[in-house]
Each structure stands twice: as C-alpha cells, then as structure tokens.
Image (cartoon, helix red, strand yellow):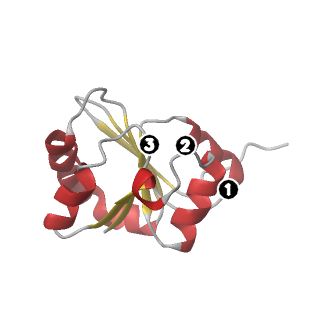
Amino acid sequence: MRLLLDQGLPRTAAARLIASGHDAVHVGDIGQASSTDSAILELARVQNRVVVTLDADFHAEMALSGATRPSVLRIRIEGLRADGLHELLDRVISLCESDIEAGALVSVEVQRVRLRRLPLARPPE
C-alpha cells in the first residue's frame, strides 16, 4: 500500500513500512512538512497514497468535500514510536485493506478501529 505519513508521526516509520512491503514516504522527507492539509490531501490523491495522520482536520475536510479519495487513517494514539506505528499500521491495513483501497476514513484508537467508506453522505440542505 502507498502511504503518506503526515507531520507529527515518526519519520523513521517510513523505512520500517518500506521494509514490510509498503511504499511509504513522510511529508518531511519530501519537502511538504509545512504544507496545508488540503495540499497534502491533493498530493496523496495525485500519487494514489493513503494519508496517515494524527490530525482530525483531514477527516473533516474529506467529509465536507464529498470526495472518494484519498483514504485517511487517523491515529488517535499519542506517543507512538516508529516500531509501534509500523506494527499498528500493518494490523490496521490487514484488517481494512479492501475498504482503504476503495476509499475510506479510518480512525484508530487503542481498543477499536472505526471505518467509514467514502464518500460520506452530505446532509440535506
């Protein structure tokens, strides 16, 4: 799976993910550390990557846009180091891979994983 790790996640996690078969890059390693959420989402969409983030704003932007891509995995566990993030992502991806590939918002907590397929329905105006 092609992953784009957002600022706030360990940069060294990308190398561990690559070693386990993922195509992973960190925004800090490609000169995008200070990019806006919208720019990161667009980069992920163009490069067919899944955004991995700690930031709730990505889910909100995707929900409001009605877009079907990219998928966003929001990690709601603070303080993960590279090894822990790598292991967590491997488990979540194996659990939700087909949904993530189809377009989804995934929220990962200590005791659960929540998934919503994209696009999210817009409320009636």
In contact (CB < 8 Å): disc 2 and disc 3: no
- Among the 4 quarters of the image, the one containing residue 9: top left
**Measured Cα–Cα span from mark 1 to mark 2:** 11 Å
Whether residue 119 is visible here, answered yes or no, is no
Q: Depth-wise, is mark 2 or mark 3 nearer the camera?
A: 3
In contact (CB < 8 Å): disc 1 and disc 2: no
Nearer to me, 30 or 111: 30
What is the x, y in percent for residue 20? 14, 65
What is the x, y in percent for residue 107? 39, 40
In contact (CB < 8 Å): disc 3 and disc 1: no
Q: Which residue is mark 3?
A: 7
Residue visible at 60% across and 51% down in the picture: 120
**Measured Cα–Cα span from mark 2 to mark 3:** 16 Å
Residue visible at 27% across and 34% down in the picture: 112
Q: Depth-wise, is mark 3 or mark 1 nearer the camera?
A: 3
Q: Which residue is mark 2?
A: 59
What is the x, y in percent for residue 3? 36, 61
Nearer to me, 101 or 58: 58
Q: Is residue 6 above or below residue 67?
A: above
Residue type, label 2 = His
Q: Is residue 26 above or below residue 58?
A: below
Residue visible at 47% across and 72% down in the picture: 48
Q: Quadrant of the C terminus?
A: top right
User: What SS does tag 1 mark?
Assistant: loop
- Tell me, for residue 66, which label it has, or none: 1
What is the x, y in percent for residue 49? 44, 66
User: What SS does tag 2 mark?
Assistant: helix
Residue type, label 1 = Gly
How crowded pointer 3 is (Cα within 10 Å; few <14, some 14-19, many 20+) is rated as some
Q: Earlier in the sequence, mark 1 or mark 2?
A: 2
